[in-house]
Image (cartoon, rainbow, N blue to C red):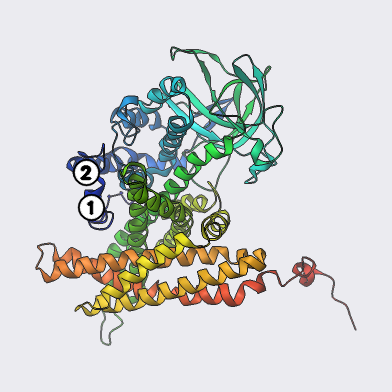
Amino acid sequence: MSTYRAPLRDMQFVLNELAGIADVAKLPGYEESADVLDSILEEAAAFASGVLDPLNRISDTAGCTFDNGNVTTPKGFKEAYKQFADAGWIGLPVPEEFGGQGLPQSLLGPTLEMWNAANIGFANGPLLNQGAIEAIELCGSEAQKKKYIPNLVNGKWTGTMCLTEPQAGSDLAQVRAKAVPDGTLYRITGQKIFITFGEHDMAENIIHLVLARLPDAPEGTKGISLFIVPKFVVDDAGKLGERNDVHCAGIEHKLGINGNPTCTLNYGEHGKGALGELVGEPNRGLEYMFIMMNAARFSVGVQGLGLADRAYQHALEYAKGRIQGRDVKPGSKAPQEIVKHPDVRRMLMWCKANIEAMRALAYISAASLDIQARHPDEKVRKEHRAFVELMIPVVKGWCTETAQDVCSTALQVFGGMGYVEETGIAQQYRDVRITTIYEGTTGIQAMDLIGRKLIRDMGATATSVITKMQKVAQELSASDNADVKAIADSLGKGVATLAEVSQWIGMNAMADLHKAFACSVPYLKLWGVVAGGWQMARAADIAAKKIAAASPESEFYEAKLKTARFYASHVLTQSAWFKRQIVDGSGDVESLSEEQFELDRKMAVTA
């Protein structure tokens, strides 16, 4: 069974050379972050491999148990969560006034990657904490911040986000949960489904952030409010009181992430309703919840990255030890490790190249989160805010879709042994499957990319980012390094394709939104492939210069350069295929009537 090892050197490379952590450290309040970067990464890696990784297999095989409204997490989770909280990992980016460390969001990229690679079932709990803390911090009253955030940070309490209901799915306009005023509080009734860590035994209280409707609320998404509904009522002094009327009705039996209890929660099942506090203003709940959702969407993209890297590590370890077959060269008779087989090397290179591209794109997006929040120049903040908004659906959608392909390819390296649960690679394949679904499916991310990010500002942000990519391609085309020149040529073609397709979608959206949305997922993937290539090209240029300067780490930089060259020839070249799908094939998506989907199953008519 493979043991997870964090890719610390590549994480350091991306943070320092691509994401510009030194510039982030110059932002107000982050001045000391550069000094602690390496120690934080090393400590996180030790925690991931030493504490979380040993629980990963048992979390999959044993899973969670449900008994009369109570949920028991896998053996070791409760103790690991206490260690996690005591070490300060929950409060990494939280302001010091609430008990956090006040460090940059940039550090969430590598730490989230490690937690999820080591044990995604466990990591989903702290992930939701981050979103709950941020939503209360930005939208809650001063009293609510003081009352709830410190105990969410120190691990005594955990947080959830309670959005969807049986009839609603992803369409939150259909939310029916009700909130009726009761003095200064509200009584919440209704049912929520698919609630991650909605009930568990790892903390003394659970703080649910719940979407519900007030009695006079308008229909649709504009009539939804946000409420804090704790498992145990909390008084003004922060002390726990009576059990609130929110109860777990059951947990889901899932394909993967079995260590994560996915709960159905009933509000008001045993009385007048669960007591809740209104967050912010009435009927602005969905707007507030998007704070949690955007944070969660970025985090899920990083989840995909983490699982992909773990699967790649597992496949590489297996390929280096599995002896089967002979060299394809004539005259070879001795059996050899399958890592020497050309097609196995292709699969491993494909995994490695995509992982490095995903990591780079996720980390630079995290750096922009810091800049948009802390930079003293409003113009710079606005530019990075627009970039983050454009990239969130790409990081979530493309990274998770690619992660599925990486995990599948890693399993393929094992051959038949990969399909056997005992080797462990099947767990990564099952665990990663949910990442393209929760926090908004890939289709929802793609519609967001086109509808809210491309069309809303008439393509201004997309054009700005494309221009930056074009500049990199042009600059690198003058390189003396043959590999860098080849990468620049491939990037230039990919960027030109992205620009052309973006313009085509923008023009067609004016006349036929259905046609514009028909291939929105291929368009999102096109963005990911090209944006990933942009970062790989930057990495290749840096690596080539380090090699030319006789860096003592030349072997690392040579691997970086060769991996980028592989990405340029095997991944960036997909751009032309995506263009063909979108431009030539969008109309084909709706060419069949609903009746024609079933014609091949109707009784044949004899002549």
User: Which amino acid type is shown beneath numbered disc 1?
Assistant: Gln
Q: Position of residue 197 (x, y in %)?
A: 50, 33
Q: Which residue is outermost to the right? A: 607
- Seen at 90% across and 84% down, the residue is 607
- Seen at 37% across and 64% down, the residue is 532
Q: Earlier in the sequence, mark 2 or mark 1?
A: 1
Q: Which mark is residue 350?
A: none
Do the residues bearing badges 2 and 1 touch, measured as CB atoms within 8 Å?
yes
* Nearer to me, 16 or 184: 184
Q: Is residue 8 above or below residue 277?
A: below
* Nearer to me, 446 or 389: 389
Q: Position of residue 154 (x, y in %)?
A: 35, 25
Residue annotated with mark 1: 12
Residue annotated with mark 2: 37
The local secondary structure at tag 2 comes to helix
Q: CA distance from mark 2 to mark 1?
A: 9 Å
User: Which amino acid type is shown beneath numbered disc 2?
Assistant: Leu
